[in-house]
Image (cartoon, rainbow, N blue to C red):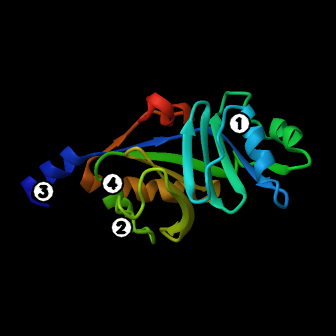
């Protein structure tokens, strides 16, 4: 890489942060999505439409499968626990704790889409994958979920492959000027607190 190219790469920058969170999958029983939507609204969350992500305090909701949602709330909060959701959703849905099964990472910076496009099967151009969109895909031979959030990308990957994905992100981000950022919480990605 020439001197002007490396100066441009360093200026572009990519920030990579982990996102410890309670992650609960909510699945509607039959056609009870409306009931789950009301339940979530009573808890201050709006369930995202299929293929989208919503970010509002106290957390994030996203849907990449019909009538199923992932709810991300702060790891230390009592609001996101699967047990509370299981009790509240009885009769209209099922809640499963995926906090240990999924790892969440947040990438931000102007070069994020270009860097992720090196291994992603999705068209990540802003016109094709605008803010608020979410999708399941394959990256570096691994299943991931990507969601675009106001200049940042949320990436969820199985915990068993998180190290591999993290190492790939670090290596691939180097030419763009990587900065490892402190841990974030779902609240940092919602409302006025957006990264």
User: Mark 1 — residue?
Assistant: 41
Look at the picture and state if 131 lies above or below 144. Answer: above
Horizontal and vertical percent position of residue 7:
13, 48
Q: Residues under labels 1 and 4: Cα distance?
A: 38 Å
Residue at 68 percent of width and 27 percent of height: 77
| Front one among 42 and 116 | 42
- Earlier in the chain: of badge 1 and badge 2, it is 1
Q: Is residue 96 visible?
A: no
SS at mark 3? helix
Using a 10 Å C-alpha cutoff, classify the residue at mark 2 as few (fewer than 14 neighbours), some (14 to 19) or many (20 or more).
Answer: few
Q: What is the secondary structure assignment of the residue under circle 4?
A: helix
Give the Cα separation between the discs numbered 4 and 2.
Answer: 10 Å
Tell me what residue is drawn at x 66 percent, y 46 percent: 47
As measured in the structure, the alpha-carbon distance from the residue carrying label 3 to the one carrying label 1 is 48 Å
Which of labels 1 and 2 is toward the front?
1
Query: Would you identify the image quadrant in which residue 32 lies?
Result: bottom right
Name the residue at 40% across, 44% down: 150
User: Which sits in the foreground, 17 or 41?
Assistant: 41
Q: Residue 5: which numbered mark, if any?
A: 3
Of the image marks 3 and 4, the number of the one nearer the N terminus: 3
Lower position in the chain sequence, tag 3 or tag 1: 3
In primary-sequence order, the first of circles 2 and 3 is 3
In percent of width and height, residue 140 lies at: 47, 68
Determine which of the numbered discs, if any, sits on residue 173 in the image: 4
Image coordinates for residue 126, horizontal then vertical, percent: 35, 58
- Kindly indicate whether the residue at mark 4 contacts the one at mark 1 (C-beta within 8 angstroms): no
Q: Which residue is mark 2?
A: 118
Q: Is residue 158 left or right of residue 106?
A: right
Q: Quadrant of the C terminus?
A: top left
Q: Residues within 10 Å of mark 4 (few under 14, many from 20)?
A: many
Image height of 64 relative to 152, above or below: below
């Amino acid at each position: 890489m020439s001197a002007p190219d490396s100066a441009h790469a360093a200026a572009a920058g990519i920030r990579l942060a982990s996102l410890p969170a309670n992650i609960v999958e909510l699945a509607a029983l039959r056609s009870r999505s409306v009931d789950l939507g009301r339940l979530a609204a009573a808890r201050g969350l709006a369930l995202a439409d299929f293929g989208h992500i919503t970010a509002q305090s106290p957390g994030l909701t996203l849907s990449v499968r019909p009538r199923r949602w992932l709810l991300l709330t702060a790891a230390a909060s009592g609001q996101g626990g699967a047990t509370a959701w299981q009790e509240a959703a009885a009769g209209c849905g099922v809640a499963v704790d995926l906090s240990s099964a999924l790892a969440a990472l947040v990438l931000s910076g102007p070069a994020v889409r270009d860097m992720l496009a090196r291994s992603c099967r999705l068209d990540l151009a802003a016109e094709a994958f605008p803010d608020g969109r979410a999708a399941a895909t394959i990256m570096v031979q691994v299943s991931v979920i990507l969601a675009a959030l106001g200049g940042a990308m949320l990436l969820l990957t199985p915990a068993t492959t998180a190290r591999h994905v993290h190492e790939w992100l670090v290596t691939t981000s180097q030419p763009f000027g990587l900065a490892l950022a402190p841990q974030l919480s779902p609240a940092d990605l919602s409302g006025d607190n957006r990264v």
